[in-house]
Amino acid sequence: MRSLPEPVPPARRGARGARRRPSWAALCALLCALAGAAAAAPVDVTIYADDHYPPYSYLDNGRLTGIYTLIVQRALERLPGYRVQLLPVPWKRGVLMLEKGQAFALYPPYFRPAERPFMKYSEAMLTEQLVVFCNAGLARMRALKVWPDDYSGLRIGMNAGFLAGGREFDAAVKAGRLSVDAVHGSRANLLKLLRGRIDCYVNDRLSILWELEHIKKEGLMAASYLPLVETVELGAEQGFLGYTELSPEHFPFRADFVQKFNAVLREMKRSGEIKEMVTRFLLQ
């Protein structure tokens, strides 16, 4: 009579016990947790800011501040998926970085699509009134009402890298009918104007008045300085956050960031929040 095979004994437990295979439910839960953690990680973004354009964007004792800076900071508080660093930069260098695709964004450029085809623009943050200030003595001697025709032969100061005079002005400069002296920052331009080293200066009215007031408060207004007068208003310019169109592989978040940033800016303008911020800053 054939004997039946002996039953296979159950696996014996070793000193460390038998291994248990994780269930599919546990694996799914682990994968979901890892995916959630990855999705929650903020995206690091660097935005550059003009370091010398008071009262809009400038350094004050090493700290970046100004009206545009405060607007951008307030908007970024409502973009929780991003961790943004704001860094000051000389204006012309910042524009060049966007032109080469080395930087993501910069504020506050004016809208110049023809001159800067590499740049796209956010929702407008603020409207500036562009004006011309000249030496009062010069303004008494000749009519300075029609821009740029009445300014032939004059030395016009401008902030380096800012395109603000208009096409007719650019044509007049190219033809040699007037000259441009561009330096870095409003204060340097105004001091040259006060000393008679340039004849007129083109910039935002608020920037000029704000800087003149601070020159007086700091005791820098010498008795020999020439009186100034506003001669003509050229129109309005709007400040934006400018984005590079280049290097999409370096900035894959661009479309999402721009869409969310624009939505926040529109709400801030609609509610009057930006207007309140400007008033509060100027009364400091």
Image (cartoon, grey):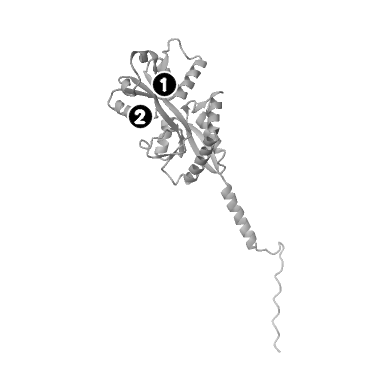
Residue annotated with mark 1 = 189
Rendered-image quadrant of the C terminus: top right
Quarter of the figure with residue 80: top right
Give amino acid for label 1. Asn
Residue 82 spot, x, y in % from top left: 54, 42
Q: Residue at x 34, y 17 (%)?
A: 143
Quarter of the figure with residue 196: top left
240 in relation to 253, above or below: above
Residue annotated with mark 2 = 166
**Callout 2: helix, strand or loop?**
loop
**How far is disc 2 from disc 1 in space, using C-alphas?**
19 Å
Give amino acid for label 2. Gly
**Callout 1: helix, strand or loop?**
helix
Residue at far left of view = 175
Rendered-image quadrant of the N terminus: bottom right
Answer yes or no: is residue 268 visible: yes
